[in-house]
Image (spheres, rainbow, N blue to C red):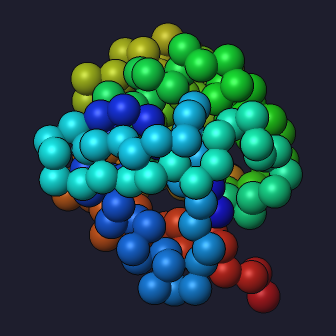
Amino acid sequence: MAFLIGPAFQDEEGTEPKKYLVSKGAEVVYVGPQKTVYRGKYGRAKVRVDKTFGEVMPSEFDAVVIPGGSAPEHLRVEEAAVNFVRGFMKLDRPLAAICHGPQMLISADSLKGRTITCYQGIRDDVKLAGANYVDEPVVVDRNLITSRKPSDIPMFNEAIYAALKPKD
């Protein structure tokens, strides 16, 4: 599973889902534009990028998580990051984005006709990108899982885990 990370990610959104998913047996790789250590927006967390976008292919991952904060704003101007998200969405595997994370989906032209939630400050942006915005803690639309803010993380985690479980 890949977590897309960049400068000023939202501290808890970049670390709490990883802790939860690793506790459930997931292997998580932080993927970013360069191999470095990024600090969270509020200085409460630091993460080290394991692989750059140039070192990975979307098909290598079963799922992708895009934390919010300011990181998506930085990542969406990185062509390799946008291409990675666009390519991953074509695989129809679980992609989870929280808070400002859907900004990456806007830049990857991946929201038209989808129902999502996000941080309130970008709701007009997702609507302009063709998404149906709803104000709910977690929204699942086929392979796409979205959430609004840090207080939604427990439900966000559960939705990601549920999407990874084999279907009976």
Q: From the viewer's perspective, is residue 60 above or below residue 36?
A: below
Residue at x 38%, y 53% (from the top left corner): 47
Residue 6 or residue 165, whichever sits in front: 6
The quarter of the image holding the N terminus is bottom right
Q: Position of residue 5 (x, y in %)?
A: 47, 42
Give residue 34's quadrant in the image.
top right
Instruction: Confirm whether residue 113 shows in the render.
Output: no
Residue at x 34%, y 22% (from the top left corner): 122
Residue at x 54%, y 14% (from the top left corner): 77
Q: Position of residue 118 (x, y in %)?
A: 37, 37
Q: Taking 167 as reference, is 117 left or right?
A: left
Residue 149 or residue 7, whichever sits in front: 7
Residue at x 70%, y 25% (from the top left corner): 80
Q: From the viewer's perspective, is residue 112 above or below residue 101?
A: above
Q: Taking 144 as reference, is 89 left or right?
A: right
Q: Position of residue 42 (x, y in %)?
A: 14, 42
Q: Position of residue 100 (x, y in %)?
A: 37, 33
Disc tally is: 0
Residue 62 or residue 165, whichever sits in front: 62
Instruction: Confirm whether residue 36 shows in the render.
Output: yes
The quarter of the image holding the C terminus is bottom right
Q: Taking 79 as reference, is 122 left or right?
A: left
Give residue 148's quadrant in the image.
top left
